[in-house]
Amino acid sequence: MSMTTAEKTSILPILLLSAAGFTVLTTEFVIVGLLPSMARDLHVSVSQAGLLVTLFAFTVAVVGPALTAWLSRYDRKSLFVSTLLFFGISNILAATAPNIGIMGFARFIPALMLPVFWALASETAVDITGPERAGKAISMISFGIVTATIFGIPVGTLISDAFGWRAAFASIAVLAFIKAIALMLFLPKVPLKKQPASFLKQFGILKNPVVVGHVLLSLLVFAGMFTAYTYLADILERLAGFDGATVGWILMGFGGVGMIGNWFAGRIVDRSPLGATILFAAPMAVGMILLVSIVRSHALLGVVLAFWGIAQAALFTISHVRVMKVAAETPALGASLNISGANAGIGIGAIIGGRVIDINGLDHVGGAAAGVMLLAVAVAFFLKLGTKPKLGHRVTA
């Protein structure tokens, strides 16, 4: 059945925000494919360069909820446009950074606005479609994440291989400015459905242990993923023996299969967010354990990476919906808390992976990642057992 004119109009803001989200998430994650070449050029080790991932992630984790709560009362269109302008400027600075210190500052700027963008874009999408279709709405917004992993990260890797890593950041800067203009011209005004609660009242949801438990679960899920994913390009180069261009194409395939995970997650997460978390996290842990042992068998490596890509994209969407549902009174803050938990996990994962590389070697990263992911599965089971339906609105375990 074809969509009505009203339905098409309501979908337009979500599509525009998803497109902008592509640039936002590419800015955060493109560095994963650039770490080896950046480390060589800036005269630091790969594990030291990996701390740039930690810096970005911890900045998001620390400032995200408070900044989102403060800015949630302002005009959404202006906030979204401003975010893209911030990202453009920061990527220009990254492209011209002469040392690791300036690069760190260039990564700090966009980290301030990323949680605000994703939290308010997610809330806007749910406002448009209704909370009963939150999974589908957020999966549409999350399509920007998936396409960033399909095209943004690997294309950045390919640009880096051909023209240098600085060209990759410069390309994202141009894209950010183009998206800012597109939002300015074509994004309709997005009125607030209701005035947000006061700053302190919004943060009252942290008194709910279920909300805190779900944020902790997001932290563990993302720590498990990024203990290994932060160093995936290095694994593919040093252990599997691929050159830089081939790594870029592999990362593109990794992101491509993620579209399956994003689509599937959007259709099952509303039924049981915790069940969906376990469904993808448990076998993903098994794949991480197997990763290094089969890395030289390219066929088996392809199978493991395919499932990893599907599960990773699915868990992005599932985690976001899961926390927003348990924080239904303040969905924007709930989204921001999830983003903070996820980015704290990303930063912790990058640290764990870097320490494992320095102490035990690159071939032990998969096992460390699996251990963290299995801890996440245990927490999900605990939350599922402790969740009881109340007043009919929140989460079905």
Image (tube, helix red, strand yellow):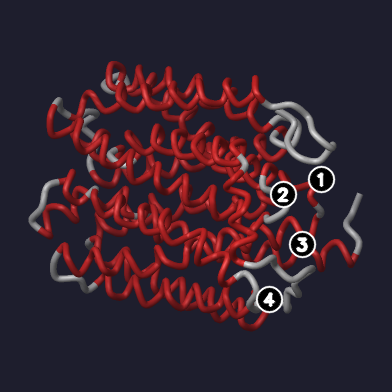
- Where does label 2 land, which residue? 328
Between disc 4 and disc 3, whose residue precedes? Answer: 3
Between disc 1 and disc 3, whose residue precedes? Answer: 3
At x 8% / y 56%, what residue is drawn?
43
> What's the CA distance linking mark 2 and mark 1?
11 Å
> What's the CA distance linking mark 2 and mark 3?
22 Å
Q: Secondary structure at mark 4?
A: loop
> What's the CA distance linking mark 1 and mark 4?
24 Å
At x 57% / y 37%, what residue is drawn?
214
> What's the CA distance linking mark 2 and mark 4?
26 Å
- Where does label 4 land, which residue? 187
> Mark 1: which amino acid?
Glu
Image x and y of residue 186, in percent: 68, 78
> What's the CA distance linking mark 4 and mark 3?
11 Å
- Where does label 3 land, which residue? 11
Q: Secondary structure at mark 3?
A: helix
